[in-house]
Amino acid sequence: MQLMDAARQNLFTVVIVEALDRLSRDMEDLAGIHKRLSFQGIEIQAVHDGTADSILIGIRGLVGQMQREDGAKKVRRGMAGVVRDGRHAGGRAYGYRAVTGKPGELEIVKDEAAIVRRIFVAFAAGRTPRDIAHDLNRENIRPPRGRRWNASTINGNAQRGAGLIFNELYAGRIVWNKVRMVKDPDTGKRLSRPNPRDEWQSIDVPQLRIVEQSVWEEVHALKTERSRLASHVKRRAPHLLSGLLRCGCCGSGMSVHDRDKTGKTRIRCSAVRESGSCANRRIIYLRDVERLVLSGMTEELKDPRLIETYVRNYNSERERLAGNAAAMRTRLEAKRDRIEGERQRNIDLVIKYVISEEDAKRRIAELGEERSRVEAELAALEEAPVPIALHPATLDRYIETVNTLAETIAGHAAADDDRGPLIADFRALVHSVIVHPRGPGQRFEVEVKGKLATLVGGEAFPEARYGSGSRVVAGEGLEPPTPGL
């Protein structure tokens, strides 16, 4: 890439290479390099082949690509032989290290193996990967890679067989050929793609077992059971606002920071903990945020039929604007056609010698200018807003959910446990809750964005802002997102 950049700056006039496959062993890339260098007037000189021309580029590109593909097949065949011999074909596995001087052989690292057993036992006991990762991070236990443990490190990917839970090496079995590497032709980056399971190759290596078979089977039975659950059950939120909280400073999510001496949960911007990239280091009690949101929502939802009226009026206005825009476009197109028709008639009259060319020349030029102005107006005309067909059943369900939420809020106002129907009803209406800190020792504001957009299409609204001292309505409020409304 540096070579091609220098070529565009005309910093040299010839490229000398040992052989053309030193530039590229890809037919497309080699041809592209030759094409671009030739455009700059730069020759490619190969030591053994001389000046490269189109024929030589085609032949050497084909030969180079075939050699590269053959080499890849031989490497994979060699790795398959390594696995058949009971040795590891490569890759860093947590809990193991390579034996010096013995390619493909592994030995168990006792400290890391103890962590692996701990993770499997905790998972079998019902703890979630996220909770396990939090515990390991609090104890400053070094992860397999990176700086911190994540739930994905433990949970992995069943299709790819990745992650600690799916690594069969811990059960004394080497599995190879789970993925294949392909190169993106546009970016040049290598990407992994999962292979079908019938192409996987495996062999038992009992000397490398870390996890007992009974624990392994229990964990995977639990994993299979969870995978069959409906998504809303499998991903049930532990708190009312789980997954909805956003930092008002950087937009990152907010997660549980710790619990105080009385057991109350406190939250903090996750970017502070993960990367330190956010300046919002404020720690806030989750219960305070929940109470502020619920009290504000109760006030907003006193008359949910207002939302129904708003949606219907909004849709009517969209239809009116769509009609106006369509009518304007029709008038301009008709005017353009009339101008073009008159222009063509004047040309025909000149051809038939009915009028002189001099008489028609000025009028034809005027008509051409007028047509250009009309076409410019057509090009500048915005597309007509698409009317949204408001489905009565959808709106009825929305209003029903609003009414249910208002009743549920009243019943959960003093509840210690926020689980139950409140979570489902609340999350059916709320898109996100943004926490805006006012500074150290000061109160905060929360901005609630709703899901009314699911009915009409557009940004998440209505939205409102509630302060821990007083209520502040957001600037947008119930303003629709369509320009002109």
Image: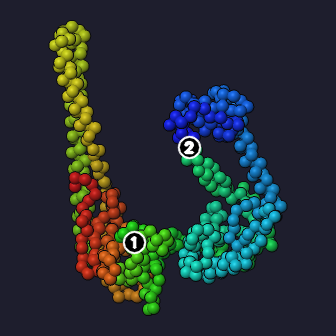
Number of the label disc, if any, that sits on residue 279:
1
Label 2 sits on a secondary structure element that is: helix
Which disc is residue 397 wearing? Answer: none
- Residue 24's place in the image compared with 468, above or below, is above
**Disc 1 packing (10 Å; few <14; some 14–19; many ≥20):** few
User: Going by the picture, which residue comes out furthest to the right?
Assistant: 85
Q: How many marks?
A: 2
Q: Is residue 369 visible?
A: yes
Q: Quadrant of the N terminus?
A: top right
Question: Given contact means CB atoms under 8 Å apart, are the residues at marks 1 and 2 in contact?
Answer: no
- Residue 97 position by quadrant: bottom right
Q: Hey, which quadrant is residue 107 in on the image?
A: bottom right
Name the residue tied to disc 2.
2
345 above or below 293? Answer: above
Residue 449, horizontal then vertical, whole percent: 33, 68
Q: Earlier in the sequence, mark 1 or mark 2?
A: 2
Question: Which-is-in-front pick, marks 1 and 2?
Answer: 2
Position of 207 with respect to 435 (left or right) is: right
Which residue reaches farthest bottom? 262
Q: Is residue 391 visible?
A: no
Spatial distance from mark 1 to mark 2, Cα to Cα? Answer: 38 Å
Q: Is residue 145 above or below residue 440?
A: above
Relative to 330, 156 lies left or right: right
- Circle 2: residue type: Gln
